[in-house]
Image (tube, helix red, strand yellow):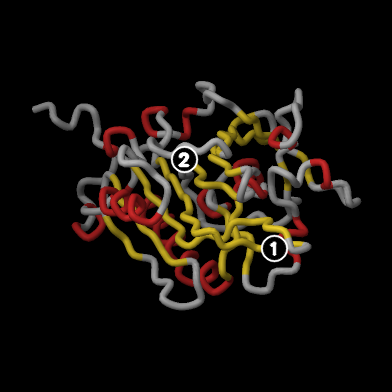
Amino acid sequence: MAGAEVQENLSPNCKQFLYMGTLPRGLQQLSFKKICQFYEGKPRFVTLFDTFSHIPIYSAYTFKRSDGSKKVDVPWMYEPQLSTVSDSREMQPFPSENLHKSFEDAQAVLEDYSNSVMFERGQLNPDEHQADIHDKASTYTLTNVVPQVREFNIGPWKDHQHMIRRRLNNYCRGTAYIVTGVTTSGHSIHRHNINRLGIPTYLWSAYCCIDFDHNAPFSERSKFPVFAAHGLNDREDNKVQEMTVQQLEDFLKKVTYVDSSFQIFYANCVALNSAMP
């Protein structure tokens, strides 16, 4: 079974997906819920989920070396604890009958995407960045998914995810921590004339890998230990631009609701012993 647990304070076994066990700083709204995503009894990644716009604000995960293949036989799942007081942290596959009324108040359901021609379900923690079949399967929850414009999802964003996968496969020797998120501007997908899903304006992503190959070509070595990118979720002008993590943070401070203390990685992903002689 897949599982997820809504947690006010993340438990230690969920903090393993965060650099120095620390969540991104400066992102707080009453409607945001921290989810520790469980699958087959193990935590797999962390999501900050917006119960108002019914989409994740970001997912934080550790990259696993992989060949980029996708696991395609997994049913889409939802998170019971977002809607009800549930003893179980186990996420459930969507029921075949029309039984979603009890939980669609706080999260997306399959019908929200079914009539959309322009948008696809885009994973923030992508299947392709995981290797173990259970880690891959755990990414197929709608709490890890945002509406992505098809042309952007299968074009520039997919290309960027593949490039990051190859870079980290080749040059990251230790653990790579990745945070991938969105900005929104108030636009929504509607169902029955009701706002159902916030539509991201930009997707952004940053990775942190302090143990990397110092003999890598400069063009790659210069993008360690930390680098970032963002792209416009649109049919045109949707090139994904790489940049430093500070440049991404400055950009996000201008276009979204983060506060002035916003920081994606603890101490900007500077190794604690890097200042030692």
In the rendered structure, which disc, 2 or 1, sits on the residue that comes first in sequence?
A: 2
Q: In this view, does 266 lie above or below 96?
A: above
Total number of numbered labels? 2
Q: Residue at x 73, y 36 (%)?
A: 83
Depth order, front residue of 16/184: 184
Q: Residue at x 73, y 46 (%)?
A: 77
Which three-letter amino acid code belongs to the residue tagged 2? Thr
In the picture, measured across the screen, residue 28 lies left or right of residue 226, that is right
Q: Where is residue 109 in the image (x, y as percent from the top left)?
A: 74, 52
Q: Position of residue 268 (x, y in %)?
A: 28, 39
User: Where does the N terminus fall, quadrant-wise?
Assistant: top right
CB atoms of marks 2 and 1 within 8 Å: no
Which three-letter amino acid code belongs to the residue tagged 1? His
Residue beneath disc 2 = 62
The residue sitting at the bottom extreme is 236
Rounded to the nearest whole Å, what is the CA distance between mark 2 and mark 1? 33 Å
Question: Regarding mark 1 in the picture, which secondary structure is present there?
Answer: strand
Q: Residue at x 51, y 56 (%)?
A: 67
Q: Is residue 124 above or below residue 37?
A: below
Depth order, front residue of 123/6: 6
Q: Where is residue 48 in the image (x, y as percent from the top left)?
A: 53, 40
Residue beneath disc 1 = 190
The residue sitting at the left extreme is 277
Q: Position of residue 230 (x, y in %)?
A: 39, 60
**Number of the label disc, if any, that sits on residue 25:** none
Q: In this view, does 252 lie above or below 32?
A: below
User: Where does the C terminus fall, quadrant-wise?
Assistant: top left
